[in-house]
Image (cartoon, rainbow, N blue to C red):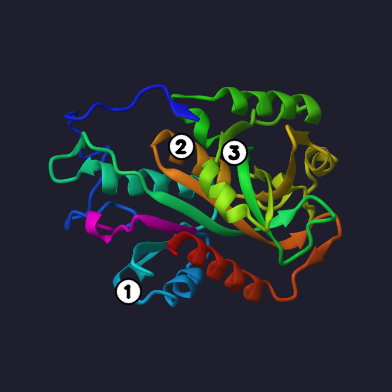
Amino acid sequence: MNPITLTEPGTVLEPSELVLNPDGSVYHLAMRPEQVGDLVFVVGDQDRVNRISDHFEKVEHRTQRREFVAHTGVHHGTHVTALSTGIGTDNIDIVLNELDALVNIDLENRTPRKEHRALRIVRLGTCGALHEDAPVDTRIVSAFGIGMDSVLHYYAAENTDREMRLLQDFLMHTEWPDNLPIPYVAQGDPRLVELLGNGNRIGITVTAGGFYAPQGRQLRLLPSIDGLNDRFGTFEHEGLKALNFEMETSALYGLGGMLGHRVCTMCTVIANRVRKEYSRDHEGAIDRMIGEALERLTA
């Protein structure tokens, strides 16, 4: 996904648009530019930040505001930030824009920089598998995210040809219901997908706008559309299958790509929706994912 246009360097961003704290940090993340590593791991769970930074040789910065916890340090000579986002694409909208502001906007003069700094941003998350042969505790790396939320529709963006082909095939295959928002498609960074996908499953990730009915779950309330998960699970495009559900990747890929960052998602399967199984040791599986990602990205 590409931006149709970007704000020109030299444009002054007003205080209501670029909101800063009294210490000059960005509003929600409460971080300053020097506190951002070149590699950023984003996680939904605040407690997972400690589990990543425990691997660092040293931790240089720690910040916390609301659900946004950040630890920045050094691992194998690489400056790494572990940052919690909370749940959902609405939070990813905040996190990606503020991370980009930290490295590509002169906060003191409130204007975009001429020189662009590209971050590697990798989501380490959890997901539900849409295929029986994707057992719990295994890992899925997302080549594409299909967004069933509406966040990216608010940005001036255009799809690549491959993203558009995937979207058209998805709409046709699922006979997309008229009462649901039109999905969008965004691609992850191919080099990161290949690196993290080695030995793991690579596929298409469906990003839901909620945890219950948007993912086909039924407690007391009924989903408005029956059988959507079956349509997702049988979707295949150019050799890639729709393998899993989660709640952040589509916005991460869309916003990250438009802002010129390298983005990728690796998720541990904690629920197999076809088998109706849930992991008995998902914490151990998540720790193994963290160790693998750190070794591959900081070696």
69 left or right, relative to 199: left
Query: Residue lying furthest left in this view?
Result: 109
Q: What residue span does the magenta drawing correspond to?
A: 30-42
Q: Which residue is mark 1?
A: 59
Q: Which residue is mark 2?
A: 257
Amino acid beneath label 1 = Val
Task: Specify which label sits upstream in the sequence, 1 or 2.
Answer: 1
Q: Is residue 34 highlighted in magenta?
A: yes
Residue at the spot 56% in from the left edge and 53% down from the top edge: 195
Residue at the spot 33% in from the left edge and 27% down from the top edge: 6
Give the label, 3 or 1, closer to the camera. 1
Q: Work out which quarter of the rendered image holds the C terminus and state it.
A: bottom left
Give the label, 2 or 3, closer to the camera. 2
Q: Is residue 89 highlighted in magenta?
A: no
Residue 236 appears in which quarter of the rendering? top right
Q: Is residue 178 visible?
A: no
Q: Which residue is mark 3?
A: 149
Amino acid beneath label 3 = Asp
Query: Residue lying furthest front in this view?
Result: 299
Amino acid beneath label 2 = Gly
